[in-house]
Amino acid sequence: MSEFEEITPLMEDFIVFQRLLKEGNTTNALQLSEELLSRSRSISERNHYYEARIRMERALIGGIDQGEIGNELRWCVDRLNAISSQSSLHGIALLNLASWHLNKNEFMMSLATHSEISTETNFPDEIVALSRLETSRILGKMEDYEPAMRHAWLARTIFSKKSMIPEFLVSSLEWLDMALDNVDKNAPNMDFHIKNAKPREKPGVSTISSNPTDIKLVVEDLIQILFQDLSGPERNDIGLIVDASEILGIEEWKDILINRLPEIQDRNLLAALQS
């Protein structure tokens, strides 16, 4: 909605609907959504954009039969592509459809849906980054690590640019987890892999060696954020940094943690640092 667009009663009531969802009041939200959907289709308040928004939300919160969810989400994608192509909402609709396919273990359909949100499109950066991260996860599950690492790196780069810190952390940690499996000082860096990536007919099992310089860059970014608070009974994120320290032979990362042992509560992490 543009800043100059008139706010209609339908829009106002849709905000109420969203507030009910945020509060977890699904029952009342569903009741209101039925009214809003009818109004969005009426002659007096017809609005294709809000019809798509309402239908997408209803599909996600159980407002339709389970067997119709996929078709409904696809309808929303097609409608938004027609009326608001490559907008944030169109991107969210694609992400929702891709997630639905993934939950049905339809990996290839999920990847195909994500492929509609490529870096060459005009979708908002945030949508592109979320799609790349989910694509990386799917490919990782399929043991197709070369593109999985590329997509995680792309996601991390965009999240950093947009100052999306939680997402930046997640994508960095997931990339690092894959990268530590195979480290080679002579390996090309991730920028080289991204620049020279070529389309493939379909995913397959693949491996990739990671360059220590890339790992060092990621770890030092992580340290600035994660080392602000070392508490917590399960800190696998910090454990990855310990692993990186040992693999790369950079003792200073472990030394920082050893000097702050009283702050660490994760017993496995304490044992690794004191061994």
Image (tube, rainbow, N blue to C red):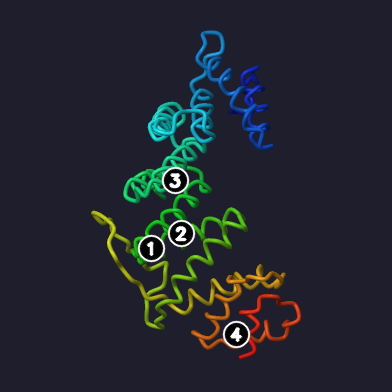
Disc 1 secondary structure class: helix
Q: CA distance from mark 3 to mark 4?
A: 37 Å
- Mark 3 or 4 closer to N-term? 3
Q: Of label 2 and label 3, which has the lower sequence position?
A: 3
Q: Nearer the viewer, mark 1 or mark 4?
A: 4
Q: Amino acid at mark 1?
A: Ile
**From this viewpoint, which residue is outermost toward the top?**
43
Question: Gap in Å between the C-alphas at discs 2 and 1?
Answer: 8 Å
**Disc ID at residue 272:** 4
Task: Tell me the distance, in whole angstroms, between the alpha carbons under discs 1 and 4.
Answer: 35 Å
What x and y, as percent, mark residue 159? 55, 56
Badge count: 4
Residue identifier under label 3: 99
The one nearer the camera, 211 or 112, is 112
Q: Amino acid at mark 3?
A: Ser
At label 2, which amino acid type do we have?
Leu
Mark 2 burial class by Cα count in 10 Å: few <14, some 14-19, many 20+: many
- The image shows residue 133 at horizontal and vertical percentages of 47, 56
Q: Secondary structure at mark 2?
A: helix
Residue for point 35% across, 51% down: 107
Residues at circles 4 and 2 in contact by the CB criterion of under 8 Å: no
Q: Earlier in the sequence, mark 1 or mark 4?
A: 1
Rounded to the nearest whole Å, what is the CA distance between mark 4 and mark 2? 32 Å
> Which mark is first along the chain, 3 or 1?
3
Q: Which label was assigned to residue 154?
A: 2
> Mark 2 and 1 residues: CB-CB less than 8 Å, in contact?
yes
Quarter of image, res 117: top left
Q: Residues within 10 Å of mark 3 (few under 14, many from 20)?
A: many
**Which sits earlier in the primary sequence, circle 2 or circle 1?**
2
In the rendered image, the quadrant that contains the N terminus is top right
